[in-house]
Image (spheres, rainbow, N blue to C red):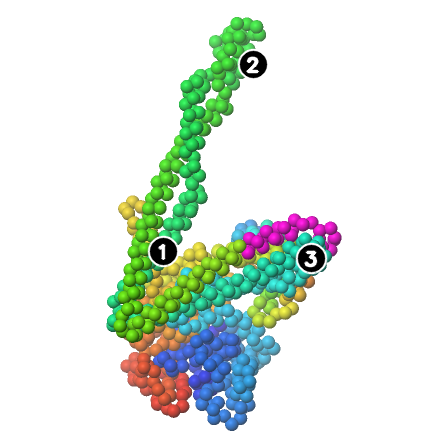
Amino acid sequence: MPEPTPQSTTYTRSQEAFLKSAEEIQQLVRSVLRDERDVMHLKRRPEIHQKILDHVKRIVR
Amino acid sequence: MILEKLIVENFRQFRGRQEIVFSDIRDRNVTLIHAENGFGKTALLNALLWGFYGHDGLTPDVAHKERIIHEGTAAKAKDPEQTTATVTIRFQHEGVKYTLTRSLSLAVQLVDPKKTLITLEVLRDGQTLTERMPQAKIQSMMPDGISQFLFFNGERIDHLAMEESAPQVTDAIQQMLGLKLLRSAIEDLKHQNVRGKLRTELRDCTSDEKAALLDEQTRVDEQITQLGEKKSLTQQNLAAIDDDIQKVSAKLEANRVAHELQAKRESLEKQQRQLSEREAAISKRLGQLVAEDGYTLFSDGLVQRGREIMARLRAENKIPARVLNSFLYELLERGRCICTRHLTDGTEERKAVEELLTIAGDQHFNNAVGALDNAIGVIEGVLQRTRENLQETNRERLKIREELVTIGETLEDIHQKLGSKEDEEVHKLEDTRHKLQLQRDEAITELGRIDAKRQELAARREALREQIQRLEDNEEAAKRAQRRLDAVEESVALLESILAFEIEDMRPILNDEINSHFKKIIDRGYWAELSEDFVLSIRKSVAVQEGTDDQVLDVAQSTGQRQVTSLVFIASLVSLARRRGEIPTIIKGLTGAEYPMVMDSPFGQLSTRFREGVARWVPDLAPQVVIFASSTQYEGAVANVLRQSKRIGKRYYLSYHGPHLQPDARQELIIEGRHLEQYFESPEEYTEIIEVDA
């Protein structure tokens, strides 16, 4: 996910959509994707749902 | 990934230990395996798939998937624990060497053939290490979702170029180009264990009214999921029906009695498809026309009324104004006329100017009337054009509909004639074809119904979400639960739009790639394209009239053309996957990855012209290419082109021992003038892999 820097001013449409969303949503999406990366190829991944729930509860108070 | 060696031991029809060393030389990247039908091409392709993914990796056309161990060996086995089938694959991935071994003992096969033993060894710095989670490692290197595009039967990929395969096409793009991460995140956020749990938490601490709405939302979500699964099944069913229709049609065309009528039917059905596509395009154009300029059709009365107002104002000398009030006010304010006389209060001169104000026109009014006059003119022009356009487009649509009716009647007539033929085979084939056509119609209708229902449910879901959000909670816990649920919904919506943008942005890049590959095969004025709806098609440009733009039409594709289009699409994905790091994306860390392509019968259904083009282009498909071909597929154009290209690095043939030779298989293989015995009569069935000079 994009980290806005003074050098990078041209964004793709998906990057623009991401940056337009609320800070809280950006943070949640980043956290979910970070965890998904490790397990996305596995058939069984029961822990991912609990991890996502934990992220939601940590970020949205 | 570059394949180095495959060792099969007692796997399916390969008895004992057999091996293939793949060519890894870039300039001679083709490994060619000659094999007649029934000699073990599919088994060899499946040895690779079984090695990488186990039982789940086997292709759907493998019969008796539970019998992995060579049947003769299994029948003679004295010790089921010691009798095994083993596949070993040595390969390189991102500069690291791996040895993958999967085996299954007869004792386990009898109980659960899915329970295989897998080990993955890594050779690093002269040391061999064993991966702790071998299957997970394989999945991270080459996810099973992409294997279907890397290891496939060339004769069975043509369905990708069918209209109903758009979901598979977008799925392929996601899988091959690293976008699966976004989809997994969306699915997990929507999962009952995440969204469902948050909804339950909210339900437990909110009002009864909101709880009822949440319950309904859960039910709607479940229905949407079920419909999604149903749609996917129906699409698979439709692809299978299309496949069967093609087979029956081919048999009818090969039949002497039915040949002429069937050929006519094929040609008419092609026309029918083209006309239907044109009709759909015209209907779309018509819709656009009505949406953009349709309002003018109802402006007759308004235009008339505007014209009357203008005429009245002219008659009353109000337009054009002889003098403007702003000018008179300026004179009065300055206290001097343009004739230099003083306009002091109470003088006759001032009175005369003030009287003029009663007939003077207003500047703004004047401007407004001018604009109105202009707008009326514009609307009249658009009205006239819209009317003509609508009439013309409608005429065109009616004409197409008439042609479609005529074709429909002729097709019905052909069906009647074929159905009443006395030839028993024709009669049966026509009956089967008719049944399949009816099944096809039902499947298409079902898809329409599913889509309509899904749209309805999606609208209901959105309405419920808004209603739930509007109902304010009093308790802090409920408010927090609502915020959390909203955050998940917003994250899903954001990820869905990101995924859609990523795929859409990929389309032009993919189209350039598709076209550059396609042009290497066909040079006449055709091009291949992935449409906005992600349908793979071949298109051509047709001059309609002098002075007008050419019309772009879809070419109704034959099975062979669809096979080429699908092959080109897959090759484009492999090529883009290789240079993935250069393509802009939101996902961090996506790097290029090389993959081999292993194809069973890539020349299978192709006409001679296509075979030549595909054979010329096939070495450039991927960094490493493995081809299985029978004598009839290889001889002639393919052999000549591949010989001239000097790209064959390794060559093998499968030698078959068995009680019968398939009718279309040859006893002798001829390669570059060498005659090789490839069939040996034997009561036990087995295949050997034999290397020959490339």
Residue B322's spot in the image, x, y percent? 44, 16
Q: Examine the structure image and report whether residue B469 is included in the region drawn in magenta.
A: yes
Residue bounds of the magenta highlight: B457-483
Q: Residue at x 65, y 52 (%)?
A: B468
Q: Which residue is mark 2?
A: B333
Sequence-wise, which precedes: disc 1 or disc 2? 1
Residue sitting nearer the eye, B483 or A25: B483
Left or right position of B54 against B158 = right
What distance separates the C-alpha of mark 3 from that of mark 1?
50 Å
Residue B405's spot in the image, x, y percent? 32, 55
Q: Secondary structure at mark 1?
A: helix
Q: Secondary structure at mark 3?
A: helix
What distance separates the C-alpha of mark 1 from that of mark 2?
74 Å
Q: Which residue is mark 3?
A: B202
Residue B302 sits above or below residue B392 on the image:
above
Q: Residue at x 27, y 63 (%)?
A: B264
Categorize mark 1 by other alpha carbons within 10 Å: few (<14), some (14-19), many (20+): some
Q: Which residue is mark 1?
A: B276
The prevailing secondary structure element of the residues shown in magenta is helix
Sequence-wise, which precedes: disc 3 or disc 2? 3
Q: Secondary structure at mark 2?
A: helix
From the image, state whether disc 3 or disc 2 is nearer to you. 3
